[in-house]
Image: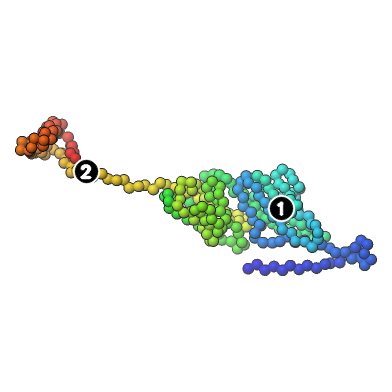
Amino acid sequence: MDFSTLISEVINTRPRQGDGQGNIETAWALIRRGTTGQVQSVLEGTKAQLECDVITSGSEVKVEWMHPDLSVIEGVDGKSELLESGQLVILNTTLADAGLYHCMVKTQAGIDLVPMRLTVKQRSLSPTAFNGEKMSVKKGQTLSLPCNVSTVEPSTTVWYLPKNRILLPTQQARRAEVLANGTLVVKKMSQDEAGEYSCMASNIYGVDMISHQVEVTEEQKPTEQKEVGPTVLVNAEEEVSDFCLSTKAESSAGEEKEKTQLAVYVQLCYYLLRNRREYAFF
């Protein structure tokens, strides 16, 4: 549980211009703390917006930003912009833009400084970057990927799905959703859901990510077996002779139509005898 107390006081420190009593009012400024907004995760090539919410007793206060290398950001440099609201906008982010930024305000009463973490997710990971599992899921099944985060300080968890889709905790999109414990669930998997699944957890102290490679396979349908008649195997000359003799006898005693059919079998029998190979009759 987070408790905070705001105390303000007007301090008379030095002579005020035109005041016979010789007092002035010194303004103070504070940056609002909180986990929301202190950690931002963006995809490589997109725009990042870092907020700096300032509370001040004066009418105006200047907000400054520092790069991760602690150099001060000056106005518009083609890469970043400082808005009048104090917001820092970074255009077309790259992996080099990731790091710990600082929002700073200065007054006569002092300086306040708050860190802001920016993480940039690479669009396409190299094969060596996959540190999770390589798994196969059948089409139509449900995919469940846990993302267990252990940290003392609060953290932000973001899921990156194939085709650069992004899901935040307790957020839903089509058949995918992120549960309260960080587990990603994708129902009725299709070929479009095959690819990279990455869970990124970050706070102001650092960032970690686990990436899985998921393959979606077609469900094999059982093949239909056709019904076939009885099989007669003829493996030896003696068996061929017995089969042919019995067939010839049936040919003499049967009807005219049946005699014609049996006569064909008799010719086949003699052919088998000459070749002496294994044959099957269906």
- The local crowd at label 2, few if under 14, some if 14 to 19, many if 20 or more residues have their Cα within 10 Å, is few
Residue 228 circle label = 2
Is residue 27 found left or right of 209 in the rendered image? right
Is residue 280 found left or right of 204 in the rendered image? left
Instruction: State the residue at coordinates (54%, 46%).
Output: 163
Say which amino acid is labelled 1.
Answer: Gln
Q: Nearer the viewer, residue 10 or 112?
A: 10
| Residue 205 visible in the shown view | no
Dot 2: what SS?
Answer: loop
- The local crowd at label 1, few if under 14, some if 14 to 19, many if 20 or more residues have their Cα within 10 Å, is some
Quarter of the rendering containing residue 6: bottom right
Instruction: State the residue at coordinates (62%, 55%).
Output: 206
Q: Marks 1/2: CA distance?
A: 78 Å
Q: Position of residue 152 (x, y in %)?
A: 60, 63
Q: Position of residue 95 (x, y in %)?
A: 63, 46
From the image, tell me which residue sits under label 1.
87
Point out the image quarter for the C terminus: top left
Instruction: State the residue at coordinates (76%, 47%).
Output: 75
Say which amino acid is labelled 2.
Answer: Val
- Please report whichever mark, 1 or 2, sits nearer to the chain's N-terminal start: 1
| Residue 118 visible in the shown view | yes
Instruction: State the residue at coordinates (54%, 44%).
Output: 126
Point out the image quarter for the N terminus: bottom right
Vertical side of 26 occupied by 132: above or below: above
Question: What is the total number of numbered labels drawn onto the structure image?
Answer: 2
Is residue 80 found left or right of 169 in the rendered image? right
Q: Position of residue 149 (x, y in %)?
A: 55, 59
Asked if the residue under mark 2 is in contact with the one under mark 1, i.e. CB atoms within 8 Å, the reply is no
Vertical side of 37 occupied by 47: above or below: above
